[in-house]
């Protein structure tokens, strides 16, 4: 049990950001990791030139790293946005334009998990209209994910840092997951269980794990307070990951923490080098 018993991947959109995007897979590999995940790297466009997609694929391949999670286009992230799919008008259109691009890229690198961030509440927009638009777009995304053999992830964020994001509890995200699966009949919508965000919301993490491990498709971790590496805060992350495993979760655990004021490569001392390469 414990950390060496998990399958970790490194989120290259929050770690190794001191390097250009195309150098990050090799840096993760040099630190001992063989699996990585990414937020949508092209925050300005849902449809980057094919040459840029090809360059990222080559960087992943050359480093020997497997991409195990990818966000759909989510607006300015990092930044003020928290997704695009429930935002009426241009942002929803951009999300739709991205769906097949992201799915095809995922297929090209063997990535089987696509995360669709819900998007913020918009001043002046009817929340029911936003939720209807969200379901419509999530159904499209779930079908595209299914086409390439992937799951669709729906994530809870935390209210203190994302006050306009409506999915700020595990049950809220699970409700959306269930609605998408009911609408598609595919069963490939899953919960992205982020222990940092859930802890910021004050949820009982052990209870969330017991209740929703079977509907969980991906896990992310950071310590709290501070969103730093395990051991920098007070969350019992090793125990919680053991509880997830005991509850039947065998998937990836994404390292989505801030390295602090040091190089990212120096932030992994909590994890033995022998436990970094995914078996």
Image (spheres, rainbow, N blue to C red):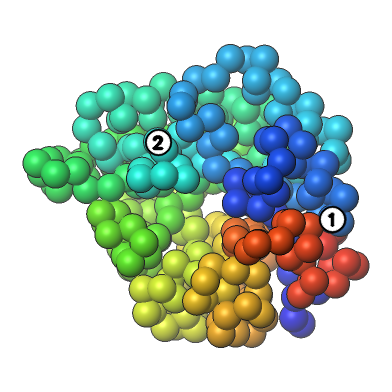
Q: Which residue is mark 2?
A: 75
Estimate the x, y position of residue 122 in percent, counting from the top left. Answer: 19, 43
Q: Are marks 2 and 1 in contact (CB under 8 Å)?
A: no
For residue 78, side relative to residue 13 (left or right)? left
- The Cα atoms of the two marked residues, 2 and 1, are separated by 30 Å
Residue 277's place in the image compared with 58, above or below, is below
Q: Is residue 7 left or right of residue 256?
A: right
Q: Residue at x 48, y 50 (%)?
A: 153
Secondary structure found at label 1 = loop
Q: Position of residue 225 (x, y in %)?
A: 50, 76
For label 1, the residue is: 31
Residue 206 numbered tag: none
79 vs 114, nearest the viewer: 79
- Residue name at image x 78 percent, y 31 percent: 59
Evaluate whether residue 235 shows in this view.
yes
Q: Position of residue 139 (x, y in %)?
A: 36, 38
**Residue 210: where, in percent of width, then height?**
49, 79
């Amino acid at each position: 049990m414990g950390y060496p018993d998990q399958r970790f991947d490194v989120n290259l959109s929050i770690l190794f950001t001191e390097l250009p995007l195309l150098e990050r897979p090799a840096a993760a590999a040099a630190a001992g990791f063989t699996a990585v995940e990414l937020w949508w790297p092209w925050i300005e466009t849902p449809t980057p030139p094919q040459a840029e997609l090809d360059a990222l694929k080559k960087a992943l391949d050359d480093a020997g790293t497997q991409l195990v999670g990818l966000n759909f286009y989510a607006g300015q992230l990092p930044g003020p946005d928290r997704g695009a799919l429930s935002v009426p008008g241009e942002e929803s259109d951009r999300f739709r334009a991205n769906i097949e691009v992201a799915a095809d890229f995922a297929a090209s690198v063997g990535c089987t998990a696509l995360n669709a961030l819900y998007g913020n509440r918009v001043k002046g927009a009817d929340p029911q209209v936003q939720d209807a638009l969200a379901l419509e777009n999530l159904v499209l995304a779930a079908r595209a994910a299914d086409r390439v053999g992937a799951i669709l992830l729906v994530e809870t964020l935390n209210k203190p840092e994302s006050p306009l994001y409506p999915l700020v509890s595990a049950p809220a995200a699970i409700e959306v997951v269930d609605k998408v699966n009911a609408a598609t009949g595919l069963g490939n919508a899953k919960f992205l269980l982020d222990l940092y965000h859930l802890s910021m919301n004050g949820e009982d993490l052990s209870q969330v794990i017991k209740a929703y491990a079977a509907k969980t498709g991906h896990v992310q971790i950071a310590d709290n307070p501070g969103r730093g590496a395990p051991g920098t805060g007070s969350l019992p992350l090793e125990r919680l990951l053991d509880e997830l495993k005991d509850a039947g979760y065998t998937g990836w655990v994404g390292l989505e923490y801030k390295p602090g004021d040091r190089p990212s490569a120096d932030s992994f001392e909590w994890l033995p080098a022998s436990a970094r390469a995914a078996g």
